[in-house]
Image: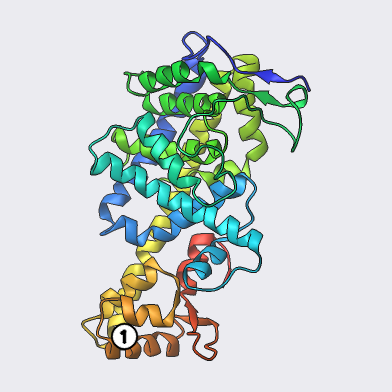
Amino acid sequence: MPTVFYHAGRFPPEEELGWPTLIPLLSPAAAALARYDALLELVPNPRLLLAPLMTREAVLSSRIEGTQATMGDVLQFEAGQAPASPRRRDDITEVLNYCTAMGHAERLVTEGKLPLCQRVLKAAHNVLMQGVRGANKSPGEYRCIPNWIGPPDCDREEARFVPIAADQLPQAMAAWERYMHSEAPDRLVQLAILHAEFEALHPFLDGNGRLGRMLVPLFLWQVGLIRAPVFYMSAYLENHRDTYYDRLLAVSRDDDWTGWCGFFLEAIRQQAEDNLNKAQGILKLYDAMKDQVIQLTHSQHAIPALDWIFKCPIFKSTDFVSQANIPQATARRILKCLRDNSICTTMVEPQGRQAAILAFPALLNLTEGNQVV
């Protein structure tokens, strides 16, 4: 297959967009997103209750780039379980960096009073690349050398795609940022174009795919389509990985912005519905568990205990006792009650001075969509 080169001089698309094709896709995507956002308003603390979905998003977005860590691997590592291999530790660190980078970007916008801009993306990239493969590839800085996309160790002539030249990046990213803050006929189409252009520019030496996917919830949040940047896209993109890359490639090769935008709108629709179903399931589980844990423990600390296991569905028993903001004797009693009633199960038995590692299976299985614990 001939190498495809960046579409110089053809961003943003103007006459290339086939609105008659896209208009029938806009309403279903926007309606699904609005239903998901309406649910966020009902969730008492979306960042707490939906924290496992954020971890799953980080796992899946990193997996698209080749990592093998599972959600269970990440949560067990956070609970103190050593990874099976150094490679798995590296994969887990990449996932955790994704979560940290996303939080850093959000804080820059809320506390730093910054708009979503190049400065925010550079800062997020700097966090994303700390201590992982690619940490020596100028974290937080645009590349100053050529790069290309293709099989491992291929040369430029064998590449599948060659992004814009490095000396043209500053001007191209400035145009990208101007478009992000411009008025557009439709915000979802604007986001589709922004994502495709970011991936085509490939401004960093590594981490572009993950950062481009972080852009999705951040942009939806900034323009007011969702009330918090907790929209998760990577499950659909991983399940349709070949089509995802082919549609992106067709933008530069064929000027097929319409095909890409159609794919993206369908991804938004399906992921909004999937996110809604999972969030509804988590909220329903929380409400059911709230009544059950209160009845079982007869404690005023039942809700803080429940909040803890929703935030950390795999955890070390000693962490629960010391960090759940519950008197320690009460925390031990509540934990025993949760175990005795099979709300929490033991993943790793205590050994010597090593505490037990416990899991909250109902939440983990709901988040993953299958029986994982």
Q: Is residue 134 above or below residue 328?
A: above
Taking the spot 52% from the left edge, 54% from the top edge, the residue there is 95
According to the picture, the residue beneath numbered tag 1 turns out to be: 331
Q: Residue 306, image x and y in percent?
A: 33, 74
Taking the spot 67% from the left edge, 30% from the top edge, the residue there is 149
Q: Is residue 169 above or below residue 136?
A: above
Left or right position of 284 against 56: left
Secondary structure of the residue carrying tag 1 is helix
Left or right position of 323 against 54: left
Q: Residue 121, image x and y in percent?
A: 41, 35
Please rate how many residues cluster around mark 1, counting C-alpha atoms within 10 Å: few if below 14, some from 14 to 19, many from 20: many
Residue 32 vs residue 170, the one in the foreground:
170
Taking the spot 46% from the left edge, 40% from the top edge, the residue there is 125
Q: Residue 1, image x and y in percent?
A: 78, 23
Which of the 4 image quadrants contains residue 113? top left
Q: Is residue 290 above or below residue 97?
A: below
Residue 216 vs residue 85, the one in the foreground:
85
**Colour scheme:** rainbow
Query: Callout 1, which amino acid?
Result: Ala
Q: Residue 24, image x and y in percent?
A: 47, 25
Residue 251 vs residue 87, the one in the foreground:
87
Assign the C terminus to one quadrant of the image.
bottom right
Which of the 4 image quadrants contains residue 319? bottom left
Kindly tell me whether residue 25 is visible in this rendering.
Answer: yes
Residue 243 vs residue 321, the one in the foreground:
321
Q: Across the whole image, how many numbered discs are drawn on residues?
A: 1
Q: Is residue 259 above or below residue 306?
A: above
Kindly tell me whether residue 288 is visible in this rendering.
Answer: no
